[in-house]
Image: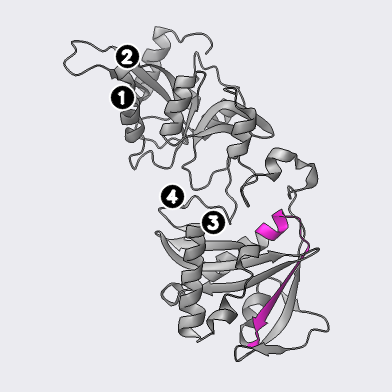
Amino acid sequence: MGPLAKAATIERLTKTNPDTIWLVARRGAARPEGFVTVLLLNEEGYEALLNDRMDLADPDDRYLVRQSETPAAVYSWASYTPGILANAIPLVVDHFSSPRYASADMIANVTTERGRRAMLRLGFDEGLEWRGTFKPNLFIKHRAPNSRLFPRRRYDQTVDSTPGTGITVVHGIDELFRVAAVRSAVYIGEQSCPYDEEFDGNDFAATHLLYSVKGEPAGCMRIRFFGDFAKMERLAVRKEFRRSTIAFELVRASVDLCRDKGFRKIYGHAREDYLPFWQRFGFKLKHNGAPFGFSGHTFVEMVDDVEPSDDAISIDDGPYKLIRPEGQWNYPGVLDRSGRSPWL
């Protein structure tokens, strides 16, 4: 879209970074028959692209990285790949999945149905929300573990890119099975907790956080939400991962999730001998709370008073945000794309 770049601009950009342009030909062809071009952007360039401040017909060198540098984003600038030549696009995407580029987000501006289908096949998300503006034609493949432009919440880590390590909100039954595996190992296996006490009928009425280490379930937390308070439960870390900060990270992520949902009070139970751990995060004994026991242990009630996040979810955030997956309110979901897609 927009004016075409001049030959001098393409030559300049190619000298800055030879990975800018890829020529495409069928096997045995005497000369190139198509091309794919990308802009390898630094963080300033990434922001300029999203803010529509970049002259895409003549991008400024200050927005670009050299071949020896790691970009913040790979932007699909322009391409001509008619017919069978379109098979070259996945090869270019594979190149930009190599270690040097693996942490760079990939972005494309798509204006045709053919291009849309191609981006979806390659795993891109349709539509991008940037500072309150939805950009339906931008397709993005988020790969940066965290960035200033798209900061990730503690409870919403991109475990696919780190690799397989981080905290996520459980959204599917497979992830819930992983949570159950951790709790079975810790509470039933180590502490001889009866099955019906551990799996108490509340798991399908709760939000769960799962901590994975290289794809292996390592820790979890359960949170239930009541009228004016949230309740944190079932913190568990497998024995082989306890010489780590996993328990601390799960508590911090759980508190963040409660604050992002607008809660001001968090309630929980702690074994008496574990109370000092919870006090590190601001929890204190509940006023008038008395010790109580079950499963052979004595517990105390505790509370933590917190402030809602500045951007806590609210009824005024609009329908699309409020139907997004739990904990992913800052990213367009499948129903955003369905409701706002220009292809309808």
Q: Residue furthest left?
A: 28
- Range of magenta residues: 257-272
Other residues around mark 3 within 10 Å, as few (<14) / some (14–19) / many (≥20): many
- At x 60%, y 32%, the residue is 338
Report the amino acid beneath label 2.
Gly
Give the CA distance from mark 1 to mark 3: 34 Å
* 26 relative to 20 in the view: left or right: left
Q: Amino acid at mark 4?
A: Asp
Q: Which residue is mark 2?
A: 34
Q: Earlier in the sequence, mark 4 or mark 2?
A: 2
In the rendered image, which quarter contains the C terminus? Answer: top right
The residue tagged 4 is: 160
Distance between the Cα atoms at labels 3 and 4?
11 Å
Q: Position of residue 96 (x, y in %)?
A: 36, 34
Residue identifier under label 1:
88
Do we see residue 270 in this rendering?
Answer: yes
Asked whether the residues under the numbered discs 1 and 3 touch, taking CB atoms below 8 Å apart as contact, a structural biologist would say no
Disc 1 or 4, which lies upstream in sequence? 1
**Mark 4 closeness class: few <14, some 14–19, many ≥20 residues within 10 Å:** some
**Kind of element beneath mark 3:** strand
Marked residue nearer the N-terminal end (2 or 3): 2
4 sits left or right of 37 in the view = right
Mark 4 residue element: helix
**Residue 69 location, quadrant:** top left
Q: Residue furthest bottom?
A: 296
The answer to whether 64 is drawn above or below residue 226 in the figure is above
